[in-house]
């Protein structure tokens, strides 16, 4: 099973992708997480990606496509995977398709998580992330037990540079211009499934399974 999660930044793709990955027992692959891990480890890729990410811009396709193709070539991806945050441009989607065709394979579903822009802005500007384990909270909707401290590992919570208000606006503009066209792209292939991203998180898995099965 190969599934793509579509949706604006902050739509809840990551949370939903983790649920699907768990349900089908397939890897959850987030290009954003791969970049953040590289930044944390101070790699060349991380240094190149950081400048784009901090401004709310997409990392160029040449860098992004390579890390994604390397990751999906790993052994644990043989039975499938769920992609969270890739593709984000039509050229990325085309490269993925071409690579899969070479292996006699294809994407099974693209799930679009639909959330209005004003909800996205509220979610992202209130988001706080743990510097150490990556867990995320929201100052109003999912507050940590102790302000500024991660419930899971006790490390400090910060606002990621790419969640700062100006950056959120840029990310939404980039989403509408470069990523939203993928909805039509996958609709044209007959594999697009749409779910609302504003419902209760406890219902999210059932909502997705209902459109997949
Ligand atoms: P995310 O955690 O998925 O919201 O990604 C965080 C940031 O990483 C994005 O705002 C982009 O700068 C970069 N990024 C992640 N995935 C991609 C991608 N497929 N193409 C280009 N840039 C990406």
Image (cartoon, rainbow, N blue to C red):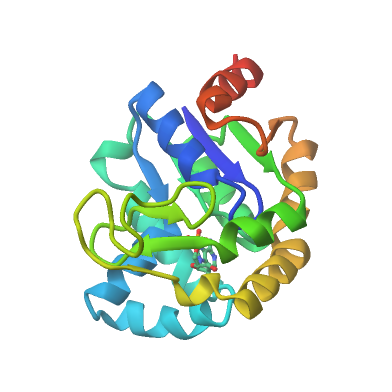
Where's the C terminus, which quadrant?
A: top right
Q: Position of residue 177 (x, y in %)?
A: 77, 67
In this rendering, is residue 213 above or below 178?
A: above
* Front-lying residue, 127 or 161: 127
* Residue 68 appears in the picture as rendered: yes
* Residue 102 appears in the picture as rendered: no
For the point 58% across and 61% down, the residue is 124
Q: Position of residue 103 (x, y in %)?
A: 45, 39
- Give the side of residue 169 with respect to residue 146, left or right: right
Q: Position of residue 51 (x, y in %)?
A: 47, 86
Q: Position of residue 43 (x, y in %)?
A: 25, 79
Would you identify the image quadrant in which residue 34 lies? bottom left
In this rendering, is residue 59 above or below 21?
A: below
* Front-lying residue, 116 or 141: 141
- Give the side of residue 43 with respect to residue 53, left or right: left
For the point 56% across and 36% down, the residue is 107
- Give the side of residue 13 with respect to residue 41, left or right: right
In this rendering, is residue 126 above or below 193?
A: below
For the point 26% across and 37% down, the residue is 76
Would you identify the image quadrant in which residue 157 lies? bottom left
């Amino acid at each position: 099973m190969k599934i793509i999660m579509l949706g604006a930044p902050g739509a809840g793709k990551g949370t939903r992708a983790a649920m699907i990955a768990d349900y089908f027992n397939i890897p959850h692959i987030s290009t954003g997480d791969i970049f953040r891990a590289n930044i944390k480890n101070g790699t060349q890729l991380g240094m190149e990606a950081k400048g784009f990410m901090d401004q709310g811009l997409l990392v160029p396709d040449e860098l992004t496509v390579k890390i994604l193709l390397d990751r999906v070539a790993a052994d644990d991806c043989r039975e499938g995977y769920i992609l969270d945050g890739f593709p984000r441009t039509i050229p990325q989607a085309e490269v993925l398709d071409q690579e899969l065709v070479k292996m006699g394979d294809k994407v099974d579903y693209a799930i679009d998580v639909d959330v209005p822009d004003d909800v996205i802005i509220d979610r992202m500007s209130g988001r706080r992330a743990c510097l150490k384990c990556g867990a995320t909270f929201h100052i109003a909707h999912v507050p940590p037990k102790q302000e500024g401290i991660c419930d899971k590992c006790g490390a400090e919570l910060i606002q990621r540079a790419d969640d700062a208000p100006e950056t959120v606006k840029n990310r939404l503009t980039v989403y509408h211009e470069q990523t939203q066209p993928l909805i039509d792209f996958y609709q044209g292939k007959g594999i697009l499934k749409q779910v609302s991203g504003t419902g209760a998180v406890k219902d999210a898995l059932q909502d997705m399974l209902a459109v997949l099965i």
